[in-house]
Image (tube, rainbow, N blue to C red):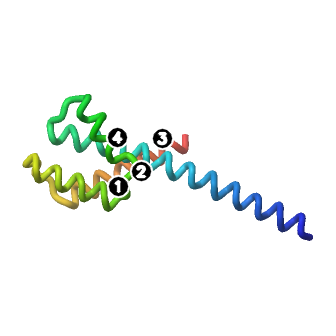
Amino acid sequence: MSDSFSDREKGYEAKWAHDEELRFRVYSRRNRALGHWAAQQMGMTAAEADAYAAQIITATDTAIFSRIRRDFDAHSVKMSDHMIRRQMEDLLASAKAEVEQ
């Protein structure tokens, strides 16, 4: 009986690790794309966009939104909070689809 429990436990742990890896890949991909999108809105060069995306790739959604909002305001980019959040959602859906292929 304990072998069965142990096997189930290992299976759950393996699934959790797999799900977390997928989640990390999805959000990293989304954040990189979001960074490039934001950089494009601010008129950055390709090199600047790569650096900007690298800075936000592992940040939380709240931190990313705050950073983009602050940077858009500093660069006089007229974009509503709703549109920024919508872009975050759209890019998340795209990243999920790409990773799950």
Q: Which residue lies furthest to the right in this view?
A: 1
Q: Which residue is drawn at 63% across and 54% down?
A: 17
Q: Could you tell which of marks 4 and 3 lies nearer the N-terminus?
A: 4
Which residue has dot 4 on it? 54
Viewer-proximal residue, 9 or 54? Answer: 54
Question: Could you say where residue 62 lies in the image, as x and y percent from the top left?
Answer: 32, 62
Locate residue 5: give its quadrant: bottom right
| Labels 4, 1: front one | 4
Kindly identify the amino acid type of the residue bearing the numbered disc 4.
Ala
Which residue has dot 1 on it? 89
Kindly identify the amino acid type of the residue bearing the numbered disc 1.
Glu
Pointers 2 and 1 in contact (C-beta within 8 Å):
yes
Which labelled disc corresponds to residue 93?
2
Q: Could you tell which of marks 4 and 2 lies nearer the N-terminus?
A: 4
Q: What element carries label 4?
A: helix
Q: State left or right for residue 13 relative to residue 78.
A: right
Which residue has dot 3 on it? 98
